[in-house]
Image (cartoon, rainbow, N blue to C red):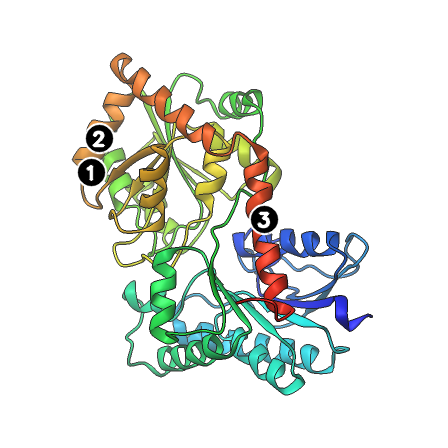
Amino acid sequence: MDAEKSVLIATQAYVPDSAAAGQYLAEVAEAMVGRGWRVTVVAPERGYNEPRHRTTGAEECPAGLSIRRVGGPAVRKQNLSGRLCSMIVFSLRVAMHALFFRKPFGMLVGTSPPILPAFLMAIARLRRIPLIYWVMDLNPDQAIESGMVSARTWSARVLAASQRWVLRHASGVVVLDRYMEKRVRKYASHPRQLEVLPLWPLEKAGNREESVAFRERHGWSNHFVVMYSGNHSPVHPLDTMLDAARNLRNDSRFKFVFVGGGVAKSAIEQAKVRENLEHVLLLPSQPLGELHAMLGAADVQVVSMGERMSGCVHPSKVYNILTAGRPFVLLGSPSNSVSDLLDRHGCGWRIEHGDSDGFVRLLCRLASAEGERELEEKRLAAAEVYRDGGAVEAARNEWLEVVLSAMEGKGS
């Protein structure tokens, strides 16, 4: 392998797993191959979102891309200390691959798991290889701000120390928004090269007929569908949406749909059964090929950002919602990347967490004859954001230019 045109990508989330981080890394891996680079991805056998699923054996890949699967325990999401033990086992296995792998020109690592970049940074410095750090979420900040752990725990201290070290020594750091940049600069005020590059939709827009068929298949044709699709996590609280569903339980116009998995979904399942909320529907994660049909099947999508999550997470699903031409309701504060998107494009509405009455009033207005014009205006605004496919290509190309330039030492 020609070291001058090779890159090693390490991640705990990768296709066919449904985790967004893995989907993005797969997309950029193929884009790098398209630029003439040879790419090797080191990823686990077990899925991140679906740990019971194992990917073994040969995988179909374009020429120039190879995937090496490593064994290890399933990710333990119950607490940060338990997760950290699983992370360390996986990271050690990946580090051994990186240490004895024929010397690549550079390495790319994301934030899954958050301890992995420190292991790869050690290998990069030992072998004098540039390392690019793609910050998709930020830990231990996310766990601390959500109240899952205290900043004083040993696991939080270890993660914070590893973040400081990696951010100070990486050849390039890419963050997703200005709020994340602010947090990163608290760890390292002057990284060698820090770029703010937003994400892009993973799939091209589907056609409206597919979404209509999805609605018909699930019996939603004559209803106003309010949908949340994604990880049901404490960092994306859905209490306000569930309370709105409770308040509208006797209004036959509405269906509230929760799609995906996560530790917080069981609370919704229990409420549905306990309170006999027949208009609350639960669906598992849908195949990537069904993504746009599903997103476009809703009248309104819901995006939730925890009050203290600004700069810790960046909901990538919002880009796919826009390509599906759907407006969305942000549950959260005005100080986050999703609120910035709303202000810039006028493609939805914002409701504060806890304001279930305000959410109900908004939904009732949109579902009425008087609200049809408002809803259509937001639909058109959402569809306009990525109507030109060139915008997606431009975002992806900008990412490639920045990352490959940093890897080659040409960045600022």
| N-term-proximal mark, 3 vs 1 | 1
Residue type at mark 3: give it. Answer: Arg
> In this picture, is 161 found above or below 275?
below
Q: Alpha carbon of mark 3 to alpha carbon of mark 1: how far?
A: 38 Å
Q: Position of residue 303 (x, y in %)?
A: 36, 42
At which x and y percent is residue 375?
Answer: 33, 22
Is residue 252 placed above or below 162 in the rendered structure?
Answer: above
- Give the residue pinned by disc 2: 360
In the rendering, which numbered label is found on residue 396?
3
Residue mark closest to the camera, 2 vs 3: 3
Q: CA distance from mark 1 to mark 2?
A: 6 Å
Q: In the image as oriented, which residue stretches furthest toward the bottom?
A: 126
- Left or right: residue 240 compared with residue 157: left
Q: Is residue 366 left or right of residue 228?
A: left
Q: Is residue 52 visible?
A: no
Tag 2–tag 3 contact (CB < 8 Å): no
User: Residue at label 1?
Assistant: 356
Residue 81 versus residue 174: which sits nearer the camera? 174
Amino acid under disc 1:
Ser
Establish if 243 lies above or below 164: above
Residue 176 placement: quadrant: bottom left
Where residue 139 sits: x, y (%)?
40, 69
